[in-house]
Each structure stands twice: as C-alpha cells, then as structure tokens.
Image (cartoon, rainbow, N blue to C red):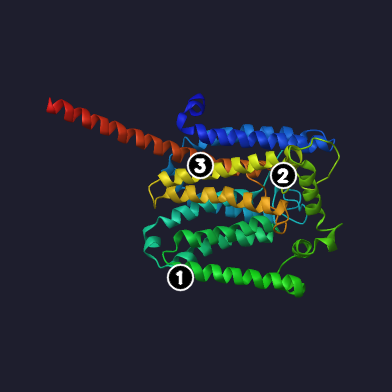
Amino acid sequence: MKKFIKDKSNFSLLFFYFSLSLISVISIFLAEYNNNKTPTLFIKQILFYIISIFVIYTMQRISIHTYEKFSIVFFIFTISLLALVLIAPESIAPTVNGAKGWFNFKFFTIQPSEFAKVSSVGIVSFLIVQDHFKKSSDIVKLIELAIILIIPFILIMKENDLGNGLYFIFLFLSLVFLVSSRNKTFFVIYSSVMGLGAFLLLCAIYFPSFLNIIGLKNYQLNRILSWLSPEKFTYDYSYQITQALNAIKSGGLTGSFAKNTVYIDEQFNDFILSVIAKNFGFIGSVLFITLYFLFIIKIMRIAKQCQQGNFSYYFTILTAFNFALPFIINTYSSTGLIPVIGISLPFISYGGSSLLANSILLGIIFKINKTINEEQLADEQDYNDYTDYIDEYSN
C-alpha cells in the first residue's frame, strides 16, 4: 500500500481522488449539520471511502489482460443481479420511492445497476477490439452494441430507475461517435435521436397521455412538465428544483453555513451540487467544477497515451465518459437546465454501491496508467543501453 501511494505515476490521480473524497464527506456532513441531523451518513461515507481505497489498490494489482479476459463473465454476473433484484421478495429487495433496484441486507445495501455500468464499459471495450467487429460495417457494429446495452437498459427500466436506464442510451450514443468510420452514419443516428427527442418533448407539452401509453410513469412525466412549467408545480414536482435553486442562490459568492435556511430533498444524492453551492458559494462551486473537469481531462490524457485501438484505450475513454456524463446531468438537473433525471454524482454523492463501482473503474485506470509508465521507462532504458553500446563500440 505504501509503495502504491508513493508511486509518482499515481500522484495526480490520487490527488483528484482524495480531493473529491474530501469534498464528498464535507458536503455530506454539512448537509446533515445544517438540518440538525446526526452525522450518520457522514460516518457511513467515510467507511465507504476506506473500503474504496482498498478496492482501488486491489484492482491496480491485477493485469489488464485479466480484466479483458473476464469482462464477459462480469457482465453476465451483473445482468443476473439485475434480473434477480426484480424477482426477489420485498424482504430482500424492497421497493423504495417506486423503484425496486436494491438488495437490502442487514448492514448494507447493493444497487446492481451501478455495477452494470462498470461491466458494460468492460464488455463494450472487449467487443470493439475483436477482429470480427473491426471488419464489420458501421451498421453491424452499432447493432451488436445495441443488443448488448439494451439488456441492462430494459432490466433497469423495469426497476423504475429512469436515471440509470438513460445512462445506457447516452453510452450507446457516445459509441456511435467512437466506432463509426463514416460521418454519414454518425449524422443519421444523431439526427434521428434529436428528432425523436423533439417529438417526445412536443408530446409532453400537447399530448402528455401519449407518453403514458408508451410506458412513461406519471411521476416521470410530471418531472418533465414541472421543468417546462415550474410555476404550475411549485409545491409538488418542481419543489425539489425550486429548493435546489434557492439553496444555490443563498450561497452567494463565498457560501453560507447557516442552519435551516433551505431544505433540499435528496440533497445527499441528486442535489449534492446544491449543498456545495450553498456552503461554499459561487467561488467554491467553480473550483469544484474545475477540479472535476481536470479529473476527466487527466483520464483522457491517459487514453491518449494508450496504444490506439486496444482494450486499454477504449476502456479509458469509456471510463472518462462514465464519470463525465453523470457530472453533466447532475449539474444541469441541479440548476434547472434539464428535468430532474435522478443520477448520482460519481465520488461525490452519498452511496456505497456507486462509490465502490466507480472505484473499480478508477483502480483499473490506475493499472493502465502504471503500465504505460512502466513501458515508457523500459523503452528509455533500452534506448540508453543501445546508446551506451554504440559509444562503447565506437571507442
């Protein structure tokens, strides 16, 4: 463990990890403190982070080849958990806020959808580097990817978890850009999606009952309607976003630690950014957003150093996407720019499953980064040995 922490190649990633963990536990503590609650979640989150450190340490000790080899097994395992949570009795998998997506054991809970995100990153990265996939046309590639991603999407939507379900839609759209060799395919897919989105938005405004017919639940529809017309839902479905915006405004430039000023529902998860803005103000929010942005940039730089087209390359890019997408959605939802979808902010929001699942991804990124640095050092050593040999031979 000491060697891992002292490894210079890990310094920047460790800096981002510990900085985000500090922001997380402080924000959760302040959320409980400001509402005169005992710091129960604060203590639990610290315990989750302690476990998270060991998860990262363990993952960075395993070879990349092993991850690639077992990506299919892990994907099947997480899909099995998604199916199992749906059929499990209420005593084991209770319905919470209309969603049935957690295994509830005596001392802890497990949310399979968070681990399904991890396994999907692995299985997609594995598929993309296969020879038959590389030789396929764009349409065949996208069909194969759609078949894989539609399985967790359907199961998670069955759980009534819209936020995590939409994650797989956005993941597929990112893959359209990543694997399409022709701009025409990219343009057609995105134009179709934008057209469908515009159609559904018009339906929400003029024919909301149509969205119920195609499977959208009433509370999900009301989230969209409250976003479009918040004044009509002030004390109902738009209450969350109204309170979140009030909290952001109350923070001002430098923040306020005043108690009982604004109550925010789901402040430990979906609206954790509002807690940060309230307590640390505009300046603190900008610093946090900048830190998270640099964290994503660091992972993308690691991807750039990978051999283009191999498993590590795609895994790193998709991991960056896995961290960036929830950040964008969470930020936009908290500020009212999009309807509240309900997705946690990686490494910031409260939750053991989300933190540990993302720690698995980050641990593998640590391994990829370490492998790159070892290969660079080996190349430098070979070059130095070669030049020494030439000098000795010349003399």
| Residue extending furthest toward the front | 253
Q: Secondary structure at mark 1?
A: helix
- The structure residue drawn at horizontal position 55% and vertical position 70%, both measured from the top left corner, is 191
Residue type at mark 2: give it.
Answer: Ile
Residue type at mark 1: give it.
Answer: Lys
Q: Residue 372's spot in the image, x, y percent?
A: 40, 39
To which residue does mark 1 refer? 184
**Is the residue 302 above or below the residue 149 in the image?**
above
Q: Is residue 229 left or right of residue 45?
A: right
**Is the residue 130 above or below the residue 261 in the image?**
below
The answer to which of 173 and 133 lies nearer the viewer is 173
- The structure residue drawn at horizontal position 49% and vertical position 26%, both measured from the top left corner, is 6
Q: Note whether residue 214 is visible.
A: no
Residue 352, by quadrant, is: top right
Q: Earlier in the sequence, mark 2 or mark 3?
A: 2
Residue type at mark 3: give it.
Answer: Lys
Q: Secondary structure at mark 2?
A: helix
Q: Residues within 10 Å of mark 2 (few under 14, many from 20)?
A: many
Q: Residues within 10 Å of mark 3 (few under 14, many from 20)?
A: some
To which residue does mark 3 refer? 298
Q: Note whether residue 280 is visible.
A: yes
To which residue does mark 2 refer? 272
Q: Earlier in the sequence, mark 3 or mark 1?
A: 1
Q: Residue 146's spot in the image, x, y percent?
A: 53, 64
Q: Residues within 10 Å of mark 1 (few under 14, many from 20)?
A: few
The span from disc 1 to disc 2 (Cα, nearest Å) is 40 Å
